[in-house]
Amino acid sequence: PMVRDLGSHNGTRVNGRTVGDEPVPLDDHGVLRVGDVLLTYERDRATDADEPAGVSREAIPGAASTTRRLRGQLARAAADPSAALIVGETGTGKEFVARELHRLSARQGPFLPVNCAALSPQLFESQLFGHARGAFTGAQAAQQGLFRAAEGGTLLLDEVGELPLSLQPKLLRALQEREVLGVGESQPVRIDVRVIASTLRDLVKLARRGSFRLDLYARLSLWELRVPALRERRADLFGWLDRLIQKWFRDRGQPARELGELDAEAAELLLLHRWPDNLRGLDRVVNRWCTEPVTGGLTVEQLRPWLATDAGPDTTDRGAQVTSSGSADSVRSATAEAEGKPRSEQSRPPKPSRIELE
């Protein structure tokens, strides 16, 4: 849709930019501000039909369309024992999705996560598939390995994109044959393990470059679930902010207390921040807010340095002027204008906004 302001007193902004008589496009996941009211726009609104019952709203919270669709995909994938691949940027909560997938599958065995980037290339087979006693120097006792430890349950291969190319055929064989052969053992052992892999990397691109096996990707991605970035589920941001604040106090055994309100500019800045670290970046803001003294409501000036530590190469969303290192140009100009007005004019009740969506 297109947005234009029909002469309102308190102003209209789209993605941090002031809207006038000329129509401005409002893109998917865009932020519309009418006076001090903030709204997020979603082009394709998910319905109840997109979200089967059963997925925990505590594990996968949120009301954004992208979140609701993820819960729907998760419910459909859970009933199938096939391997699943969870993709998403760092800090989006991929392990939460994997744990909920395991819970919904009703598998009786354990959920066992393993970081592929931390697996020793020299001991990869031993760590995943086990080894016999005396199989190599230092193998003083037999070990069953992670696959057998997850028997009847789910094995999460976190950051599977970091797995060295030389080790990938061994993982592929275990997935295809549903059996493992430990180092120094003579007979393979059948396994009943559902494998879930997660990654922040584009495995198809890696396969084209020759650093990830395409056949392994095909085997892992029989179900592929994409966890949306925080900027793709802006409708959920303040819900996550509240959850992380409550968790901060709970983890420290403290009763939750009021932190004060966000003013409109600070709330807009949070919504338009690109969040390269996603929920981890939001958690850092919560930590600063809970530990540093904030008098009254949280303002842009207080929030700006907290977001600067979360800045990646591109810290603004498309078309936005709000950045981690500064407020929107329109925020600055609006503030300057307000400071120059007589007090009576500043306190005048704003005229209701009139905007038009085309």
Image (spheres, rainbow, N blue to C red):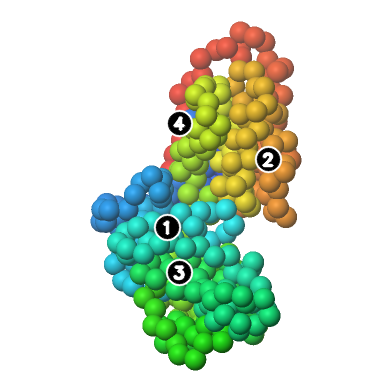
**Residue nearer the viewer, 75 or 313:** 75
In this view of the protein, which residue sits in the foreground, 164 or 16?
Answer: 164
Q: Is residue 118 visible?
A: yes
Q: Nearer the viewer, mark 2 or mark 1?
A: 1
Q: Amino acid at mark 4?
A: Arg
- Label 4, label 3: how far apart the Cα atoms are: 62 Å
- What type is the residue that disc 1 sits on? Arg
Q: Is residue 5 shown left or right of residue 178? A: right
State the separation of the CA atoms marked 2 and 3: 42 Å
Residue pictured at 65% horizontal, 48% vertical: 316
Which numbered marker is on residue 354?
Answer: 4
Label 4, label 1: how many angstroms apart (C-alpha)?
46 Å
Earlier along the polypeptide chain: callout 1 or callout 3? 1
Tag on residue 20? none
Where in the figure is residue 149, as x and y percent of width and height? 45, 69
- The circle on residue 307 is 2
Identify whether 354 is placed above or below 172. Answer: above
Q: Which residue is mark 3?
A: 149
Q: Quadrant of residue 202?
A: bottom right
